[in-house]
C-alpha cells in the first residue's frame, strides 16, 4: 500500500506541512528580530562609549587633548575577544587620540552609525561631533568608536536559536500526540474490520452507528444502506429463481408429456391435434418466460433513485390500445378511450408501456362479451392519473392487495398471475401509486395508477 493511501500519513502531512511552513516563517521573523535587537544593543554600547570619550576631551592651553578613561573601553569589553577601535580628531586638524587605521566618517547628523573594516575584519562603528569653544571660536571634534562583531553575532544567535529549538520541540510533540490520538481514535475501525468476517458468518452484517464518532457515522450508515440494497437484490434474485423454477416446471412437464405422446401416435389426425396442443403450450411457456423477465426487470429498478426521461402517457396508451384492438375485437369487447393531452411523466417508456398493456389486457380478458373497457387518462390535482375500468365480476375487497402478489389469481381465467405483480413493481419504480377500486354502480373493477407529472 502506498504511504499516500494511509489516512494516518495523510493527516500527519496535513498537520506537519502547514506547521513547517509556519515555523519557517516564524523562524525568519525571529531571526530578523534577534539581529535587530543585537544591533540595537551594540549601537547603544558604542554610543555610550563615544559619549564617555567625548566627555574626556579637554583643553591644554590652546590645544585639545583627550585622556580616554578606562570606563569608556570597559563599556565595550566582551567575553568574545572583540577588538575595540577609537579615534578622536579635530575636523581639519590632527588626531587627538586613537589610531589612524580606524576609518572615520564625518557624520551628516550626530550621532551616525556605519559599517567598516579594519585590517579586513568587519566592524560596527559610530561617530559623533562635539563642539569645543575657545575665546569665541568654535572647534569641532569627531569622536568615532568601533568594535568587531563577535559579541553581536553571539547575542543574535543566543536570541533566535533557542526559539527554533522550542518550535522544533513543539512540532515533535504535536506529531507524537497526533499519532497517539489517531491510533486511539481509529481503533473502532480496526475492531470493526476484524469483527466483520465473523459477523458475516454468524449474524447480520449491520453495524450499530451509535458508539461511533460523528465523522464515522455517515460512512457506516452508507455502508449499511449498501448492504440493504445488496440484500434486497439478492432476495429478489432468489425469489425470481424460485418462482421461475416453480412456474416453469408444470408447462415444461406438460410439453414433455405431449412430446412423448406425439412420438407414439400413428394417426395423422391425432398427431396434428397433439402438435397443435404442443404449439399452444409453447406459446404459454414463452409468454410466461417473458412475464418473468419483465417482473425481474421491474423489481430490479432502484425506485429510490429512478429518474428516467419525459414520457408522453397519451402516446403510450394509444399505442397499447392499438396493439390490443384485435384481442378486444375477438372477445367482442369495446375499448373506449378518453385521453388528456400534455400528460407527461418521468420514467421508462418501455416499462410504462408494459404497465398500461397489462392493465388493459386484464380488463379485456375479465370483461364479458359485449362489454366495454374504459381507458381514461387525466391530468388533475397535481397528478397524471390512468384509469382502466372493466365490466367483469369484480374483485372482493379482501383480495385486492393479494392480487398484486406474484402468481396469485383471483379467478379461474387462464393466466400466469404475474400481470398485476408486474404493474405494481413498475409503479414502484416510478414512485407511483396503483390500486383497485369498485366500478360504477358496483359493477366491475377500476385499476388506477397515479403518477407525478414531469
Image (tube, rainbow, N blue to C red):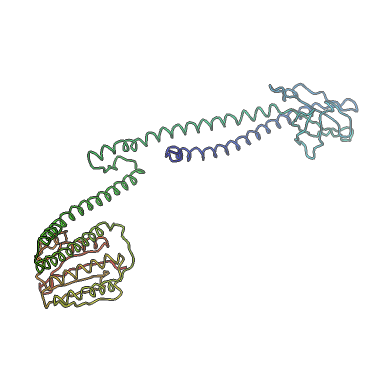
The answer to whether 38 appears left or right of 316 in the picture is right
| Figure quadrant of the C terminus | bottom left
Q: Position of residue 342 (x, y in %)?
A: 31, 74
The answer to whether 403 appears left or right of 99 in the picture is left
Q: Quadrant of residue 358?
A: bottom left
Q: 35 or 288, which is in the foreground?
A: 288
Residue shown at the point (19%, 76%) measured from the top left: 326
Q: Quadrant of residue 438?
A: bottom left
Q: Position of residue 321 (x, y in %)?
A: 22, 74
Q: Position of residue 141 (x, y in %)?
A: 84, 32
Q: Position of residue 48 (x, y in %)?
A: 73, 29
Q: 238 or 29, which is in the foreground?
A: 238
Q: Classify 169 as above or below 280.
A: above
Q: Classify 63 as above or below 10.
A: above
| Figure quadrant of the N terminus | top left
The answer to whether 96 appears left or right of 213 in the picture is right
In the image as oriented, which residue stretches furthest toward the front?
A: 266
Q: 115 or 265, which is in the foreground?
A: 265
Residue shown at the point (67%, 29%) measured from the top left: 153
Q: Quadrant of residue 246?
A: bottom left
* Number of marks present in the image shown: 0
Amino acid at each position: 500500500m502506498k504511504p499516500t493511501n494511509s489516512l494516518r500519513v495523510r493527516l500527519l502531512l496535513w498537520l506537519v506541512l502547514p506547521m513547517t511552513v509556519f515555523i519557517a516563517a516564524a523562524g525568519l521573523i525571529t531571526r530578523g528580530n534577534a539581529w535587530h535587537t543585537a544591533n540595537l544593543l551594540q549601537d547603544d554600547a558604542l554610543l555610550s562609549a563615544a559619549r564617555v570619550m567625548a566627555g574626556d576631551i579637554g583643553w591644554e592651553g590652546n590645544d585639545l587633548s583627550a585622556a580616554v578613561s578606562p570606563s569608556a573601553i570597559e563599556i565595550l569589553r566582551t567575553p568574545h575577544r572583540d577588538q575595540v577601535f577609537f579615534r578622536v580628531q579635530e575636523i581639519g586638524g590632527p588626531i587627538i587620540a586613537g589610531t589612524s587605521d580606524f576609518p572615520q566618517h564625518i557624520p551628516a547628523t550626530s550621532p551616525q552609525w556605519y559599517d567598516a573594516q579594519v585590517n579586513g575584519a568587519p566592524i560596527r562603528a559610530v561617530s559623533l561631533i562635539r563642539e569645543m569653544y575657545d575665546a569665541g571660536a568654535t572647534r569641532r571634534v569627531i569622536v568615532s568608536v568601533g568594535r568587531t562583531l563577535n559579541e553581536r553575532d553571539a547575542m543574535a544567535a543566543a536570541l533566535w536559536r533557542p526559539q527554533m529549538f522550542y518550535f522544533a520541540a513543539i512540532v515533535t510533540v504535536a506529531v507524537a500526540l497526533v499519532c497517539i490520538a489517531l491510533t486511539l481514535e481509529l481503533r473502532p475501525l480496526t475492531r470493526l474490520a476484524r469483527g466483520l468476517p465473523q459477523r458475516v458468518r454468524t449474524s447480520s452484517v449491520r453495524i450499530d452507528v451509535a458508539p461511533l464518532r460523528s465523522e464515522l457515522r455517515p460512512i457506516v450508515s452508507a455502508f449499511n444502506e449498501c448492504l440493504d440494497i445488496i440484500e434486497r437484490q439478492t432476495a429478489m434474485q432468489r425469489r425470481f429463481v424460485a418462482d421461475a423454477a416453480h412456474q416453469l416446471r408444470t408447462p415444461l412437464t406438460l410439453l414433455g408429456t405431449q412430446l412423448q405422446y406425439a412420438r407414439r401416435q400413428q394417426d395423422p389426425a391425432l398427431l396434428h391435434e397433439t402438435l397443435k396442443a404442443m404449439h399452444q403450450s409453447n406459446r404459454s411457456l414463452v409468454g410466461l418466460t417473458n412475464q418473468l423477465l419483465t417482473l425481474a426487470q421491474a423489481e430490479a429498478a432502484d425506485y429510490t433513485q429512478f429518474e428516467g426521461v419525459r414520457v408522453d402517457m397519451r402516446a403510450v396508451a394509444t399505442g397499447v390500445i392499438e396493439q390490443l384492438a384485435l384481442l378486444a375485437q375477438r372477445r367482442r369487447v369495446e375499448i373506449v378511450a378518453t385521453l388528456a393531452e400534455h400528460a407527461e411523466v418521468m420514467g421508462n417508456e418501455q416499462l410504462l408501456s408494459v404497465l398500461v398493456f397489462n392493465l388493459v389486457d386484464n380488463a379485456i380478458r375479465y370483461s364479458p362479451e359485449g362489454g366495454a373497457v374504459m381507458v381514461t387518462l387525466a391530468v388533475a390535482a397535481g397528478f397524471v392519473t390512468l384509469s382502466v375500468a372493466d365490466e367483469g365480476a369484480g374483485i372482493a375487497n379482501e383480495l385486492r392487495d393479494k392480487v398484486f402478489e406474484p402468481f396469485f389469481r383471483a379467478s379461474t381465467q387462464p393466466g400466469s398471475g404475474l400481470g398485476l405483480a408486474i404493474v405494481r413493481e413498475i409503479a414502484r419504480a416510478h414512485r407511483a401509486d396503483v390500486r383497485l377500486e369498485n366500478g360504477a354502480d358496483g359493477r366491475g373493477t377500476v385499476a388506477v395508477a397515479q403518477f407525478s407529472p414531469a
